[in-house]
Image: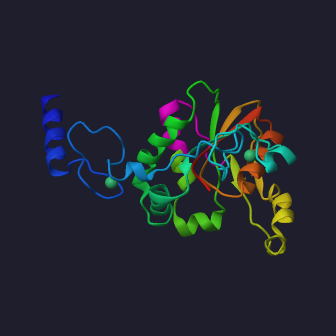
Amino acid sequence: MRLNRSLAWLLAQLFPPACPLCSQTFSAGWTDPFCSDCLPGFLPLPAAHCPCCALPFAATENSAHLCGRCLKQPPPFRKVHALGRFDSSLRDAVHRFKFNDRVGLDRPLGTLLDRVIPTDIDIDLIVPVPLHRRRLQERSYNQALLLARELARRRQRPVAVDRLLKGAETAAQQGLPARERERNLHRVFHVQPPLHGERVLLVDDVMTTGATVRACSRVLLDAGATAVEVAVIGRA
Ligand SMILES: [Zn+2]
Ligand SMILES: [Zn+2]
């Protein structure tokens, strides 16, 4: 026991805990996952945003109305919980996490994401947005799965690995206009084996048009989920 503590002390001297973005050593007693210089760059959503899909509004005042898209086509998910705007430090962190093999960012980003998801929502299963197999081979890891694992660890809930899968988008689909492509996107995702009334937390790193999370949510509900909530790091 004493040996373990000495070893921990020695490791802390050799490798003092540092900010995963700028490598600045944390000051004693610092408990946030990023340093005081980087943390302010994680911009929260503006007060005015869609209460359903978290789309930031241009208006500065907070008005709790749905965006045009959610009014016209109510989304299959209940709500999107977003850490912040896909901008500044947050965009930088997501890019490094996704493209620069900085897999160690899963814990710091997952810590911050966990803070914006209400503790009282009911979740039975955490499901990452999948990558197509070929993309997974190129990149060697799915950043959404790493985030899902971190949330699962914190929430003490199971994470569904390879339950929601992504097939190939056909060349014909890729040529379609955005709206039609979105209509066809749900055929790209499938769930196996079926679900049995689980309340799902769907996890992705970034949400831009929302086409992917809409398609995944639809497929999860069709496969037997009772409800889907969405958690993303950045909302564009
Ligand atoms: Zn920093
Ligand atoms: Zn909306």
Q: How many marks?
A: 0
Which quarter of the rendered image does ligand 1 occupy? bottom left
Q: Is residue 204 above or below residue 184?
A: above
Residue 171 image offset from top left, x and y in percent: 80, 75
Q: Which residues are magenta?
A: 148-162
Residue drawn at the location 36% of the way across and 57% of the way down: 21
Q: Does the magenta segment cover residue 155?
A: yes
Dividing the image into 4 quarters, which one contains the N terminus?
A: top left
Is residue 73 in view from this perspective? no
- Residue 28 rendering spot, x and y as whole percentages: 20, 39
Q: Position of residue 18 (x, y in %)?
A: 27, 51
User: Residue 33 in the image: x percent, y percent?
Assistant: 36, 44
Taking the image as shown, residue 122 lies to the left or right of residue 173, namely left
Seen in the picture, residue 59 relative to 141 is either above or below; the reply is above
Give the camera-side residue of 213 and 91: 91
Q: Quadrant of the C terminus?
A: bottom right
The answer to which quarter of the image holds residue 6 is: top left
Tell me how the rendering is colored. rainbow
Residue occupying image coordinates x 84% and y 70% = 177
Residue 65 can be seen, yes or no: yes
> Furthest residue to the top?
120
Residue placed most toward the observer, 65 or 107: 65
Q: Is residue 64 above or below residue 188?
A: above
Q: In terms of image quadrants, where is residue 76?
A: top right
* Residue 49 highlighted magenta (yes or no): no
- Looking at the picture, does residue 136 appear above or below residue 107? below
